Each structure stands twice: as C-alpha cells, then as structure tokens.
Amino acid sequence: MYRTKSVIFIFLCFIGISGYSQTQYYVSTLAGDSTGLAQGFDSNAGYRNGVSTQALFNNPTGLAIDTAGQYVYVADTRNNIIRKVAIPSGYVTTIAGDTTDIKKGLDSNIGYHNSTNPFAAKFSNPWGICVDDTGNVYVADTYNNVIRKIWVSGGVTTYAGSDSGFAGFVNGPNAKAEFYLPLSLAIDKSGNIYVADNGNNSIREISVSGVVTTVAGTGPTDSTGSYIDGPIDSAAFYDIYGITLGKAGDIYVSQFGSNVNAIRRIYNGRVTTYAGFDTAGMDTDVLSESQVPVGYRNGKNGAVKGDTLITGVLFNGPTGLAFDTSGNLMIADEYNNAIRKFKASDSVVSTFAGKDTVSTFGFLNGVDSLAQFFNPMGLVADKKGNFFVADLGNNVIRAISTKPNFTGVPSITKPGYKLSVYPNPCTDRLNIVSSFNGNAMLLDITGRVVWTSSNFVSPYTLSTSGISPGMYFLRITSESATEISKVEVTR
C-alpha cells in the first residue's frame, strides 16, 4: 500500500501509552491475530474473517463507528475491502469488496466496479470511512478519486466523483464533481460529508442535496507546501490527512508531509493553527521556503515572530483525529508512535498513549505506560470513552479503554531484554550490544532498509561512515523478542 503523492505509505513507528490523568487506561487488541507479533515477528498481514484472535488485516487505515456503538468499520486498505468489527467481541466480517483473489493469496482484486452485490464491488486503496445514522457506509476510495457508498441494503455505488475515476478539482453536482486522492471523511448530524481532499490541498463538502463545494483550500496548483492561516478564501493547506468535526460546527484537519506537521481548525470563515506551532507573524515567503518543525514535544503551542520559532508543541506525522467525551482532541501521531491529547480547557498537548519523550514501536498490550504500537493511523472514539486505533504496522485494531482486556483477550507481556547503542548520536561507527542475537536491520524513517544482517551476533560495531546523516531505527529480532532503538547519524 502506498502513501499519496508517490510517497511510500508504509512507515515504521511504534507507540506505547502513557496516561496523564487519574484514570488508568489500558491497551488491548480488539481484532487481529497477534500471535506472531508477541514473538517478535511482523508477518501477520493477510485476509481472514472470524473471531478476534484469528482475523487478519492488511494495512488497516481509516476507522468509523456506528451511532449505536456496535461496530467499528475498517478500511482494510491493502486488501481493498471494507471490514466490520463487532464491539466488544471483536468478531470480524467483510461488508464490501471482491475477496475472490485474496482468498487465494493474490492481490489482484484492486479496481473500480460498482455492483448490487457488495462482494463483487472493487476498490483501489480505500482509506477514509464514515457511517450515517441509518447505517450506510461511505468510503474515500483514494486511488479511484471518488467517494463510494455501501448501502444498508448491500449494494455499492459511487456517491460523489467521476465514474471514470479521473482526478480533478471540480465542484458541482455529485456525479460531475472531481476529487484528487481523497483520504479521510467525516459526517455531521445532518448527513453532510466532509472530505480531506489530499491531492487538491482542500477540504470539500458533499451536501445531503448532492452538491460538492470547497470549504477551504486553494486547490492543486499550490504545490509548494504553503501553510497560510487566515480567511478561508486565502488560507492554504498541504498534505491533508485526518479530519473530524467539533460540536460547534468547526472542522479539524491534520497536515502531515515534508514540511507540515500540525492540526488546523476551520471555524467562522477562518483557518487557524489549533495544535502544533502557531504561524502568527510568519510571512508567506518564510512559510513556503522553510520547513515547519517536526519532533516530539508536549506543552503549549509555540509561536513564531518573523522567521524565529519560539519552541512549543511538535508533532511528527499527525494523522487520525477524534474527540473524547469531554471535547479534548485526540491525535494519532504516527512517526512519534503515540496518541497525543489536546486538552480543550488549557490548550496543553500531552501524550495519551505511548512514551512521552522517545518514539518506540512494537507490539505490546497492557497498561498505558507500557503498551506499544506500530504505525497508529485511524482513530475513532465511542460515546463510552473508549478509543479504537488502526495499528497499521501490526495489522490489528487496538482498543484503549479503562478495561485491562476489552474483549477478554489476555494482555501480552514482554520479557526483560536489553539493547544498547553508543555513541548516539554517532559519526563513523556505532557499537551495538544486545542481550540476544538474531536478525538486525537499520531503517530510515520511511522504512527503507539501509543495513541488515541475518546472523547478527552481539557485540557488534557497525560502520556508519557511508550512511547519510539523519534519524534511523535499529531493530534486532529473534524468535522470542524484538528490540528497537532510535539512532542518529551526524557528521
């Protein structure tokens, strides 16, 4: 599966969970076979329906929940199908998409086909998903550049966008409108659907009357990565991913790309930076030419004066967005392998799930401060205060709740293994000391393997003189364990 704009979609991240209030939260697996993950393997991608512990997914991304809180709907992106997970049992079924080939172990079910038989329909990298009050499911069929509808009665149709699947930036009646790599969806109480139109750098609205309009954004011509707050007719976006709606009719979107890592708010005809650093005082030229800082820092939003950043909150890959029952915004911070929380009462960002200072990816259930994730993407909350995460890298759906075992599946614990690297940062060499041997990999932040050893034996000295400066992840895997350490190479 691939990210839009020709960027490889698979990212290597891990998250755990750290509570920041009196309420203790736990992470457990709602659905997905995690047997191999607990042993340090990552080969659980596949397709299988059934009970929670036996189901298989292949790069799940978007999530939605029905109004009754009975099901979590999943855009199973690389399988090109839409799944449904029962709450709280975790039983998985397929509701739409041709599974004939994937049942044979093939991946040739990608396509664009509507049908009265939902299992004859074809999708192409579906991502975003939402559900209306009557149970109809809407899907951002990303690579087909359309929004599809899965009717309660079972059929699949094109709800908005060109039947040809052509990419474009056209408003008007649903059948004549055009999108360009639509990613995420949100639906309001009236049934209007809002689209994070990634390729068009815009937020679009599909009204219940069947008309597509642009809410904010300048369209596909703005490819410089501009980041401009202000009136909606002049505000600029780039690389929009997540979208959610507030109670006041406001819209929140996450931006995640080569030079944007922030949460924007659209309200009363204006676009502002809601979380991340504040662009007030930074002129357009600076915004276009300078990278918006990335990193991992909690606290209050920073501010910018001229071209000088006053340090504040930093994100590194915000994607899924959801509000909790108190109106706080939860953010899936993918590259930081964490779920972050923007507290509405004081505008402070903290870590809700994952380590609050260091990115750690893996698979581990349990109390919030110990749990680990791998590529958290989709995020949705129910009315009871539970959260569900599409753990893309682990190919499972996780639950974050006050229950130690949301479905009754035992939490997975982890032996006390150790991995040490020094010096870190390093220049020409890195010393590696591990409490176990096995397979070793050094990967950059996009998941590209820059060094590997299938017969790693500790201790080991790795020459880094030929490796470009930057941030990397060292991963050591054996039959019983996986340990990861962040490594920085400098010159």
Image (spheres, rainbow, N blue to C red):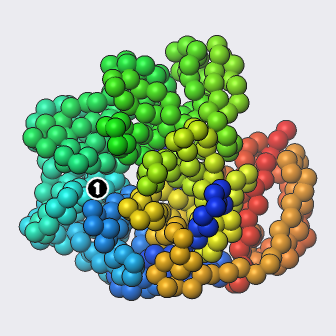
> Which of 212/22 is in front?
22
Q: Which quadrant holds the C terminus?
A: top right
Say which element carries label 1: strand
x, y percent for residue 164? 16, 46
- Residue at 61%, 67% (x, y): give it: 24
Instruction: Name the residue carrying label 1.
Output: 130
In front of the other: 372 or 467: 372
Q: Is residue 344 left or right of residue 157?
A: right
Q: Nearer the viewer, residue 92 or 66?
A: 66
Image vertical order of residue 62 relative to residue 457, above or below: above
Q: Inspect this view and state whether residue 261 appears.
A: no
Q: Residue at x 42, y 82 (%)?
A: 52
Task: Give the residue type at disc 1.
Answer: Cys
The x, y position of residue 458, in whole percent, is 88, 73
User: Which residue is located at x 46 percent, y 34 percent?
Assistant: 264
**404 left or right, relative to 221:** right
Indicate the quadrant where residue 375 lies.
Answer: bottom right
Where, by quadrant of the figure, is residue 414 drawn? bottom right
